[in-house]
Image (cartoon, helix red, strand yellow):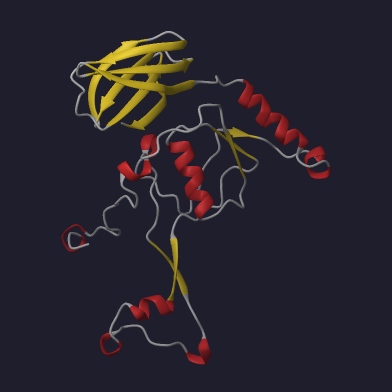
Amino acid sequence: MEQSVETGATFSAALPLTPEDLANRIGQQYFGPVVLITNARCYSATDMFAAGFQDHAIGTVLGTDDNTGAGGANVWEQGQFMEDFPVASSPYLPLPNGAGMRVAIRRSLRVGERAGTPLEDLGVVPDERHRMTRRDLLEGNVDLMARAGELLRSQPVRELTIADVTRADGSLRLSLKTANVDRVDVYLDRRPRTSVDIPDGRADVTVPGAGAATSVRVDGFALGELVASSSRRL
C-alpha cells in the first residue's frame, strides 16, 4: 500500500491466505474423475471454490449459466471498521437511526493460467455449458445429471497410492499402486530425489540415501502432464 503513493496502484499486492504447505499437507485423497456443477447463484465462497477447482485443473466445470455469481470478496460491516480505529481518531461515525453499511473488501484473484484476473464482477466461466431442460425442471435435473455422467465417463480413472514403505541400507523402498500413470517423480522432505517410468498395477521404486527422510511425496504423470500426487509421513 505504501507503493501506491508512488505508482498510483488502486489495490495492494496480492497475498495468499493459505500457505502452500498447509494446503497440501494431507496430499491427494481421491483419484477418480470429478465434475463441478455451477450456476449464476454460486456466489462468494462458492465462487472462490469454483475458481480454485478450475484454476488447479481438478476437473470439468459444468455450468447451467454463462458464469457464476461473481462475488469474490469479503463483506465487512461498518462496525468492524469502527472497531479497528480508536474512537477519538476514527474517521467512521455511527449512522443515524441505527442504520448500517457493509462493503466488499479484500478481493480474490485467480491463479494458474488466469493468474491476476479478479473474481469479483467476472465470476467463473464454465468449461462446459448445459442449458436446463423441461425434464430438469420437472424431474429433478435428470438431463443435467446425465450430462455430468457423460463428462465423468470420458475422463480416466487414475490411482497413485503408496501401499508400503520399507527402509534398508539407507535406502527407501516404495511399493506403489498405480493406474493410468506412466511416470513418477519422488520427493523426500520436499526435495526431488528420483524419476522413473512405471507400469500400471504395482511398481517398486527404490530411493538411495534416504535414511534421515521424514516425508515422501510421489507425483504421477501421464504423457508429461502431472495427474496425481500422493504423500506420506515416514
Q: Residue 76 is drawn in which quadrant? A: bottom left
- In front: 122, or 158? 158
Image quarter of the C terminus: top left
Q: Residue 21 at x, y = what percent? A: 31, 42
Q: Residue 155 at x, y = what percent? A: 57, 21
Which residue is pictured at 47% across the width and 73% down the height?
A: 102
Query: In the image, is residue 43 above or below residue 76?
Result: above
- In front: 168, or 157? 168
Please state if 197 lies on the left or on the right of 39 as rendered. left
Query: In the image, is residue 102 above or below residue 174?
Result: below
Q: Residue 177 is drawn in which quadrant? A: top left
Image quarter of the N terminus: bottom left
Q: Residue 75 at x, y = what percent? A: 46, 66
Please state if 59 lies on the left or on the right of 40 as rendered. left
Count the marks.
Answer: 0
User: Is residue 54 among the parts visible in the rendering?
Assistant: yes
Please state if 163 lies on the left or on the right of 139 as rendered. left
Residue farthest toward the left in the current orientation of the protein: 6
Which residue is pictured at 40% across the width and 76% down the height?
A: 80
Please state if 228 lies on the left or on the right of 214 as rendered. right
Which residue is pictured at 48% across the width and 37% down the height?
A: 54
Q: Residue 213 is drawn in which quadrant? A: top left
Q: Residue 85 at x, y = what percent? A: 29, 80
Query: In the image, is residue 29 above or below residue 51?
Result: above
User: Is residue 70 among the parts visible in the rendering?
Assistant: no
